[in-house]
Amino acid sequence: MYEHCPHCNFRYEIEPGYFWGAMFVSYALSAGIALVMGFVLFYGFGDPEGWVYVIVIAPLLVLLTPINFRISRVLWLHFVSGVRYNPNL
């Protein structure tokens, strides 16, 4: 992630450890993905054995980690800093 926005020069890191809260957002997103996939496996595939849940959900979470990392930081930035999206810029 950039230290400053390349368009408006907004500094993302307001204080040391500012994105520490993004860790909790990332955890919530990962838990939500795992929960949804668990429901899909349970109801869509007739409650397979426990190892099937692990074989499907764990690699999915690993593959989505880069996306989750960026989304959680952006969500935390918008939630805490008061930054608002302006499509006219």
Image (spheres, rainbow, N blue to C red):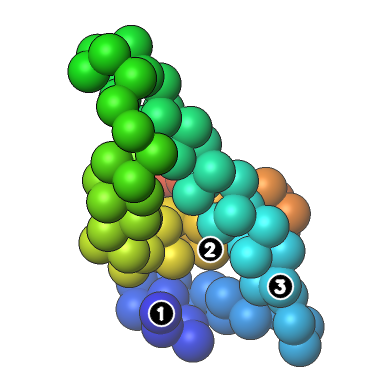
Under tag 3, what secondary structure?
A: helix
Residue type at mark 3? Trp
CA distance separating discs 1 and 3: 15 Å
Instruction: Give residue 45's quadrant in the image.
Output: top left
Residue occupied by mark 1: 1
Name the mark nearer the viewer: 1 or 3: 3
Is residue 88 among the parts visible in the rendering? no
On residue 55, which mark appears? Answer: none
Residue occupied by mark 3: 20
For this rendering, which residue is in front, 23 or 50?
50
Contact? badges 2 and 1 (CB < 8 Å): yes
Q: Earlier in the sequence, mark 2 or mark 3?
A: 3
Name the residue at 63% across, 81% down. Answer: 13
CA distance separating discs 2 and 1: 9 Å
Rendering coords of residue 85 (x, y %): 47, 45
Under tag 2, what secondary structure?
A: helix
Q: Earlier in the sequence, mark 1 or mark 3?
A: 1
For this rendering, which residue is in front, 55 or 23?
55
Q: Earlier in the sequence, mark 2 or mark 1?
A: 1
Rendering coords of residue 55 (x, y %): 27, 51
Residue type at mark 2? Arg
68 over 7 or under it: above or below: above
CA distance separating discs 2 and 3: 9 Å
Contact? badges 1 and 3 (CB < 8 Å): no
Residue type at mark 1? Met
